[in-house]
Amino acid sequence: MPISDTNLDTLNQALAKLGLRSTRQREVVYSVVAIAKDHPTADEIFVRSRRAMPTISLATVYNCLETLLECTLIRQVNFERESTRYEPNLAPHAHFYCDKTGTVMDVHLPEDLFTRLTGLLPNSTSVSSVELNFRGSLPDPAANFQN
């Protein structure tokens, strides 16, 4: 799976800000996460990365993910007692976790909702991020979730 020119440029710029350079391993891992819509775990990213680079190790995938997190190209999505998942969507949004299937979906919320939520905090509070997660089950797990 070759990395798109746009993703390669984005990766190179983000790495350069930290004084790092692009490697084939970083390109493969970033490409996997950038096109993923299912919030894959590190193990799932490893399996997908091996399709493009059979010699990549799980340790290398973890190292690449840490670098991509440090560059703020991806973010972690965490649910209680579940494996950490990764996504490229850095815009403010929530997540829904289906307890039946383990599926994680983005939930797009009105922009003003995050402003209203942070407005509930004391005035001197500095918010670096907001994580809003829903858990439950869909009436039909095969149905597309739309908000």
Image (cartoon, rainbow, N blue to C red):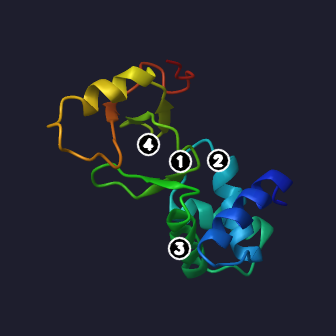
Kindly check if marks 2 and 1 are in contact, taking CB atoms under 8 A apart as contact: yes
The three-letter code of the residue at mark 3 reads Tyr
Residue 85 position (above or below residue 46): above
Task: Residue lying at the far left in this picture: please name it.
Answer: 122
> Dot 2: within a 10 Å radius of its alpha carbon, few (fewer than 14), some, or many (20 or more) residues?
some
Secondary structure of residue under mark 4: loop
> Dot 1: within a 10 Å radius of its alpha carbon, few (fewer than 14), some, or many (20 or more) residues?
many
Task: Choose mark 4 or mark 3, whichever is in front.
Answer: 3
Task: Choose mark 4 or mark 1, whichever is in front.
Answer: 1
Task: Residue lying at the far front in this picture: please name it.
Answer: 124
Gap in angstroms between the C-alphas marked 4 and 1: 10 Å
Residue highlighted by disc 4: 102
Mark 4 or mark 1: name the one nearer the start of the chain: 1
Residue 41 pos. (x, y %): 51, 58
Mark 2 or mark 4: name the one nearer the start of the chain: 2
Residue highlighted by disc 3: 62
Kindly check if marks 3 and 2 are in contact, taking CB atoms under 8 A apart as contact: no
Gap in angstroms between the C-alphas marked 1 and 3: 15 Å
Kindly check if marks 4 and 1 are in contact, taking CB atoms under 8 A apart as contact: no
Residue 118 position (above or below residue 43): above
Mark carried by residue 39: 1
Q: Quadrant of residue 1?
A: bottom right
Gap in angstroms between the C-alphas marked 2 and 1: 6 Å
Secondary structure of residue under mark 3: helix
